[in-house]
Amino acid sequence: MTQRTKLILGIVGAAAAGVAIGMLLAPDSGNATRRNITRTAGGWASSVGDLLANAKGQLTTAKTKGKMNGRRLANKADDYL
């Protein structure tokens, strides 16, 4: 995981904890609180899913670039031999 990904996950986690604590301390009824928690958790799941999809794309790109660079260097080495 990159430093940026760790930072984003930390921010999302801290925000999630803050919202959860706020909801638990809110003066709403049990049903309203559970409904809010469910709605908020769904949003978090979507955000984390987007983050993971983005990370997967970045890893795929890095893998492709690494393979291309490896082949290029191998061809260069063959040229010297």
Image: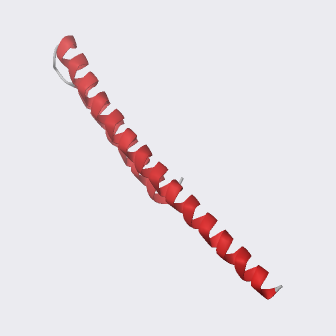
Q: Is residue 76 left or right of residue 58?
A: right
* Percent x, y of residue 57: 45, 53
Residue 23 in the image, given as x and y percentages of width and height: 24, 26
Q: Nearer the viewer, residue 78 or 34?
A: 78
Residue 2 appears in the figure: no
Quadrant for the C terminus, please. Answer: bottom right
Q: Is residue 79 left or right of residue 2?
A: right
In this view, the residue in front, 21 or 76, is 76
Image vertical order of residue 32 relative to residue 62, above or below: above
- In the current view of this chain or complex, which residue is farthest to the right? 81
Question: Which residue sits at x=44%, y=58%?
Answer: 4
Apparent side of residue 39 relative to residue 15 in the rendered image (left or right): left
| 52 sits left or right of 43 in the view | right
Which quadrant of the structure image shows residue 49?
A: top left
Locate residue 38, reporting x and y percent. 27, 22
* The one of 79 and 8 positioned closer to us in this rendering: 79
Please give the name of the residue rendered at 31% of the width and 29% of the height, measured from the top-left corner.
Answer: 41
Kindly tell me whether residue 79 is visible in this rendering: yes
Looking at the image, which residue sits at the far bottom?
A: 80
